[in-house]
């Protein structure tokens, strides 16, 4: 292999110069912030003095696990810049909001990503007709956040005027926003530049360096559609609250139709139908999903299934658990994740098609509109009507641009895994998640030049990763003093929440309307999708798109975290499934087999039989 250690290799020098300006305030393990500390994560940010409140809310379903340095340097730093550029375009960002290029909106503390609640609330301050509370409802929901406290510089007349123009244009949407088509175009262009996996290491490494520049604009499109979806959903939420029935917002939102993140479930359900009609496939699934594709490869009766499943992986294989992480499993590289969902769906004795569940969707929306409209002022009524019409387009755009941003990571994941595979043949670690714990550019290039020389470092990092993964980070951080070391997190592990008892009502936030009764199935990992039986109520800690196929066989969904525009809520509405989010400690307090009644409109989960 021609690559030399990073300190001398020209690719490493270019990578270092590109990343240096953005990473200079990222502290390393054991960095001392003016106080005695223990062990810190490999890379870590600094709490902003101007915008000091950070939360795990919302980002917990995007980055649920400890973040690797590889993903932080190549992805998150680019995302921060794109987010600022997008907010400037929308009018949200004022000229003096940030005094440096160092990450602020996306924080990395105690091994986990955080969102800057202080700054995101400002979009509610500056957007006419919105509020910090509306932003909390749309995107955060859970926890008991520190109240918004107005500070000098929060209000900006110029920003308000620019946001008003942006929002009014968004409210007039009559078709799919242009950010969606732009995202598809950019992703296709980037995929076309991916080198062959037979290419030399130098060429593969050079391709990795092109990712941040390509990723930024596509991620920016996602931030634009997310921001506008949040503002518009806030208009609907405020209207329902003004009518004294905040839960009606779930019926106002309803199904947007053609939401890409709901298509995964529907595609897998179609494949499950093929399995049900093929006895040899039913038998193969009975034997487990591990190695299933190899076992049925020569079965002529499985030809249709094989073709359908490969088509699914080609179209949707970029998704998977924790899929913003560049070293993560996907349905393309770990097909067992999708096969487990098919395993659950194929056992259903009744039709799981969403169409039967959504039959009253339009009727419920119309009834909610009639109940809310009399309580609104004249100007509010006009914006309310526009928001009702525009919301489906922006809900679709939010999920489509998110899907495309993840799609852009697929070539990088493939190339990185190939480099890891090659290094493993020369004495390196075969696990890409382990190699991603090395810091770009120096450590990464040094590893690919001489894998055995970095194995001790990787072993230490893996041990540290396991410790952080077992710890619970604070939900809110409001100062640098709040950022714990791993020793502090281990010493302050939360006590296990007491189990809920018969008759107890657990409260959360309304997500998707409807009422369902069934037995709970607590699932902590989407890889265990085969555990859920049709008709059970899925109780999960969070739900990124890898969980989506579990929704279809479930009669309802209960999630520890989430808010009105969370992924779980959007998908549940598309599939016609009642959903309650932000149910604190649901996965700890509810046990599998408990009989539940889930009211997605009221935001309650009642234990009818513990």
Image (cartoon, rainbow, N blue to C red):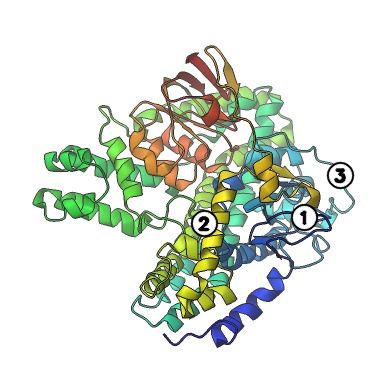
Q: Is residue 437 above or below residue 381?
A: below
What residue do we see at 25% from left, 27% from top?
349
Residue 102 at x, y = what percent?
Answer: 73, 65
Closer to the camera: disc 2 or disc 1?
1
Residue that badge 3 annotates: 150
Q: Is residue 20 visible?
A: yes
Residue 368 at x, y = what percent?
Answer: 57, 25
Residue that badge 2 annotates: 324
Residue 155 at x, y = what percent?
Answer: 84, 50
Mark pair 2, 1: CA separation: 23 Å
312 lies left or right of 119 = left
What residue do we see at 36% from left, 26% from top?
535
Q: Tag 2's secondary structure? A: loop
385 lies left or right of 592 = right
In which image quadrant can residue 147 be found? top right
The mark that comes first in sequence, 2 or 1, is: 1
Q: Is residue 245 above or below residue 264?
A: above
The mark that comes first in sequence, 3 or 1, is: 1
What residue do we see at 64% from left, 38% from top?
493
Looking at the image, which is closer to me, 378 or 607?
607
Q: Tag 3's secondary structure? A: loop
Mark pair 3, 2: CA separation: 33 Å
Closer to the camera: disc 3 or disc 2?
2
Residue that badge 1 annotates: 47
Closer to the camera: disc 3 or disc 1?
1
């Amino acid at each position: 292999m021609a690559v030399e250690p990073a300190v001398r290799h020209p690719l490493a020098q270019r990578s270092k110069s590109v990343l240096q300006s953005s990473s200079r305030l990222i502290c390393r393990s054991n960095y001392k912030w003016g106080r005695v500390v223990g062990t810190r994560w490999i890379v870590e940010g600094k709490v902003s003095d101007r915008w000091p409140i950070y939360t795990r809310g919302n980002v917990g379903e995007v980055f649920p696990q400890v973040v690797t340095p590889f993903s932080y340097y190549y992805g998150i730093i680019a995302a921060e810049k794109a987010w600022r550029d997008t907010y400037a375009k929308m009018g949200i960002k004022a000229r003096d909001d940030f005094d440096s290029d160092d990450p602020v909106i996306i924080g990395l503390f105690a091994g986990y990503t955080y969102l800057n609640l202080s700054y995101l609330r400002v979009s509610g301050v500056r957007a006419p007709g919105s509020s910090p509370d509306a932003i909390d409802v749309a995107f955060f929901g859970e926890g008991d956040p520190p109240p918004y406290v107005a500070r000098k510089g929060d209000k900006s007349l110029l920003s308000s005027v620019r946001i008003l123009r942006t929002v009014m244009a968004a409210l007039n949407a009559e078709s799919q926003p242009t950010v969606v088509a732009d995202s598809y175009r950019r992703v296709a262009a980037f995929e076309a530049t991916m080198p062959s996996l037979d290419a030399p290491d130098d060429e593969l490494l050079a391709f990795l360096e092109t990712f941040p520049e390509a990723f930024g604009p596509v991620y920016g499109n996602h931030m634009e559609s997310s921001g506008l979806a949040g503002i518009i959903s806030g208009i609907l939420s405020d209207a329902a609250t003004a009518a004294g029935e905040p839960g009606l917002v779930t019926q106002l939102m309803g199904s947007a139709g053609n939401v890409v993140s709901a298509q995964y479930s529907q595609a897998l359900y179609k494949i499950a139908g093929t399995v049900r009609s093929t006895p040899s496939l039913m038998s193969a699934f009975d034997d487990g999903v591990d190695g299933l594709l190899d076992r049925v490869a020569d079965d002529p009766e499985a030809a249709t299934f094989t073709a359908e499943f490969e088509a699914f992986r080609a179209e949707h294989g970029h998704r998977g658990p924790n899929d913003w992480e560049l070293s993560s499993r996907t349905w393309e590289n770990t097909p067992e994740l999708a096969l487990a969902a098919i395993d659950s769906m194929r056992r259903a004795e009744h039709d799981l098609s969403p169409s039967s569940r959504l039959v009253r969707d339009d009727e419920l929306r119309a009834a909610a509109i009639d109940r809310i409209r009399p309580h609104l002022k004249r100007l509010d009524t006009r914006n309310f009507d526009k928001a009702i019409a525009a919301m489906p387009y922006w809900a679709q755009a939010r999920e489509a641009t998110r899907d495309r941003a993840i799609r852009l990571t697929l070539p990088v994941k493939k190339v990185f895994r190939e480099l890891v595979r090659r290094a493993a043949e020369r004495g390196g670690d075969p696990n890409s998640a382990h190699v991603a714990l090395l810091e770009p550019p120096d450590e990464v290039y040094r590893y690919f030049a001489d894998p055995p020389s970095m194995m001790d470092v990787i072993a230490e990092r893996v041990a540290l990763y396991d410790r952080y993964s077992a710890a619970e980070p604070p939900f809110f951080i409001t100062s640098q003093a709040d950022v714990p070391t791993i020793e502090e997190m281990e010493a302050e592990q939360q006590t296990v929440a007491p189990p809920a008892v018969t008759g107890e009502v657990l409260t959360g936030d309304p997500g998707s309307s409807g009422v369902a009764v069934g037995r709970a199935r607590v699932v902590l990992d989407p890889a265990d999708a085969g555990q859920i039986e049709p008709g059970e109520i899925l109780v999960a800690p969070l739900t990124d798109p890898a969980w989506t196929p579990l929704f279809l066989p479930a009669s309802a969904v209960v999630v520890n975290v989430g808010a009105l525009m969370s992924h779980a809520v959007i998908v549940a509405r598309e599939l016609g499934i009642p959903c309650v989010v932000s149910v604190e400690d649901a996965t700890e307090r509810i046990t599998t087999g408990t009989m539940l009644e889930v009211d997605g409109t009221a935001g309650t989960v009642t234990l009818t039989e513990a």
